[in-house]
Image: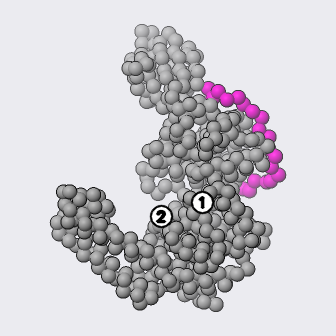
Amino acid sequence: MDSASRPIRTVVDFHQGTLRVVGLSYEFIQKAINDVPLIWDERDHCFRCDAIEASHLYSRLKDTLAGRFDWNVEASLPKIPIQDHRKLSLRSDQQDAIKSFEIGNKRGLLVMPTGTGKTVVAIELIIRHQSSVLIVVPVRDLMYQWHSKIREATGIDAGLIGDGVHRVSPISVTTYDSAAIHMPRIGNLFSMIVFDEVHHLAGPWRRDAARMSIAGVRLGLTATPPRDPQRLSTLQSLVGPILYEQSINKAAGNSLAEYSVRRIAVHMNAAETEHYRELSKQVQRFMHEQRQLDPLFRWEDSYKLTASTEEEPERAQQAAIAIRAYRAKRKIEDQAIGKLRVLEDLFRLHADEPVIVFTGSNVMARAVSIRFLIPCLLSHCAKRERREVLEGFASGRYPALVVNRVLDEGVDLPEVKTAIILGGLSSERQAIQRLGRVLRKNERDQKAILYEIVTDATNEVKRSRDRRRNDAYRPKVDSKEDGERDAAK
């Protein structure tokens, strides 16, 4: 290397979620470390890159400068002895996941179905790491759940960053939103970072939680990796490649309970059918008229059109009417009277066991709660109320529980082997997460069952079909007739 282009001394430090590099010339960077995305910062007269590049940058400087640089970036929280208080034996699939992570340069994604022990695997890797760790989770409930599990497993009172608390410790738990907010100040504190439900990281705001951390050891946990190649590529660039993947089908009967899925179609009554058809005609008529004006017009454009009250007041009004009709259709699909009758039959059929009911809306959740006098959990329920309801459900005080989306993922549920879906999104991820709620294996090796009740001859059938694209819904599916026959017993 030309001595004129090589710096005498280089200094690297952490600053506001980035690495600040002083003492390198542009020529040296172009010749020696052009694979590190360094950008010149005119304000501070230095080069910068995201903190995520710490391991890469250190390796390149070590190779090219032979130690002639000051590296002021190391995780500043002290190492602590992490003891294992658990009394458990890891299953073979959990051991395989751990081994895959360790031989995969300790950077990557572990894809394991709900109920197979992702948290157990992560805590094992945290104990083996024996240094500072930040666990990032999507919601506050999960933050407290992780805090409790870490205390049980290691005896350590982990720090909490979020929900009005800012207590930073060598092992800390935070939410994605809090991590993105605070990472410019804490991004250099932890040498390992764990992203639970890592699919939440791919969003433009939350990905900062990964970009601004220097952690070289990166673990992502999920049961449902993104199907979209671009989002998956984003996760792999922020955390690492998929190092281990286990399907529900492979786990069923081994680490998970055997299960079956039964779909029951219910018919609308005469009044619902007539109203539904009239609403459908309104929507179809609107779409036909708009495509006469613009052949490329899509339904999604209707929402934007409603804002054009000054430019195109008549079209904006028509769009608003069509959207109201569409929402009224969804309401009929979601709240068809026949669903409640079938639900009553299923409650009778499973009267001696706990049942969880997933709905597609808060309104339907409340309707089920009022009709059958069972507790209802929604996203806005207070933490204390949620804990009381879940404890009552676990103890058997409440025979059933109805929720909308609040328990779709992450939060541990009491043992339950029967779930009923009354509606939801077309999301395949939501479907797999809801199926996973009933698949934890128990000592009795009890078989799990998931009922899906859909309103026939409506768009809900298509959404149900979209949800079932995953292989987990295909091989163990009972026919509609079997489901209807069992529900009628």
Q: What residue is at 66 percent from the left and 35 percent from the top?
A: 168
The magenta stretch is 74-92
Residue 88 part of the magenta segment: yes
Q: Position of residue 47 (x, y in %)?
A: 44, 22
Residue in the picture at 75% in, 33% down: 80
Residue at 61% across / 85% down in the picture? 345
Residue 227: image location, x then y, percent: 47, 57
The reply to whether residue 301 is visible in this rendering is no
- Magenta stretch secondary structure, dominant: loop
Q: Calculate the distance from the C-alpha at mark 1 to the C-alpha at mark 2.
A: 24 Å
**Is 147 displayed left or right of 420 in the figure?**
right
Quarter of the picture containing the N terminus is top left
| Amino acid, disc 2 | Ser
| Identity, as a three-letter code, of the amino acid under mark 1 | Cys
Question: Foreground: 329 or 106?
Answer: 329
Could one spot residue 424 in this view of the protein? yes
Q: Is residue 291 magenta?
A: no
Which residue is identified by label 1? 381
Name the residue beneath numbered marker 2. Answer: 427
Per the image, label 2 sits on a secondary structure element best described as loop
Q: Secondary structure at mark 1?
A: loop
Percent of width and height locating residue 19: 50, 26
Q: How is the image coloured?
A: one colour
Judging depth in this view, the residue of 6 and 190 nearest the camera is 190
